[in-house]
Image (tube, helix red, strand yellow):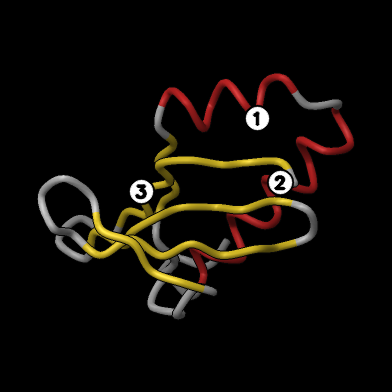
Amino acid sequence: MAADDYEPVLSSKAWELLCSLSRRRQQLLIRLIQQVAACPAQVGDYQTRDSTGRKLENLRLDGFLITYWADGAVNELRVLDIIEL
């Protein structure tokens, strides 16, 4: 990860999914999250909104659907949910 990349921060729900995967799938998912963190402003496949009205990006990558938002104030990529497709 480059110094200017956003730091990924996973919700407990996303963390649980990551921990439930095989080691190989964990490594793949970590690489995908780091890829998103390197370019957090990219537009997802579709957008949704959370209960506060914040726009959430939903991105399909290599068998996963990752829901996130970029917190520019603290350079963190907030990963809220991950679904294995």
| Disc 2 residue type (three-letter) | Leu
Indicate the quadrant where residue 11 lies: top left
In-image side of 55 versus 58 (left or right): left
Q: Residue at x 33, y 59 (%)?
A: 69
Q: Residue at x 13, y 58 (%)?
A: 53
Among the two numbered marks 1 and 2 on one chain, the one whose residue lies closer to the N terminus: 1
Q: Residue at x 53, y 27 (%)?
A: 15
**Is label 3 in a helix, a strand or a loop?**
strand
Taking depth in this image into account, of 64 and 23 the one nearest to the observer is 64
- Mark 2 and mark 3: Cα distance apart in space: 15 Å
Crowd class of label 1 (few under 14; some 14 to 19; many from 20; radius 10 Å): many
**Is label 1 in a helix, a strand or a loop?**
helix
- Mark 1 and mark 2: Cα distance apart in space: 7 Å
**Is label 2 in a helix, a strand or a loop?**
helix
* Picture layout, residue 10 above or below residue 38: above
| Disc 1 residue type (three-letter) | Leu
Q: Which mark is residue 29?
A: 2
| Disc 3 residue type (three-letter) | Arg
Q: Residue at x 61, y 65 (%)?
A: 35
Is mark 1 in CB contact (under 8 Å) with mark 2?
yes
Q: Which mark is residue 18?
A: 1
Q: Which mark is residue 78?
A: 3
> Which quadrant is the N terminus positioned in?
bottom right
Among the two numbered marks 3 and 1 on one chain, the one whose residue lies closer to the N terminus: 1
In-image side of 33 versus 6 (left or right): right
Indicate the quadrant where residue 59 lies: bottom right
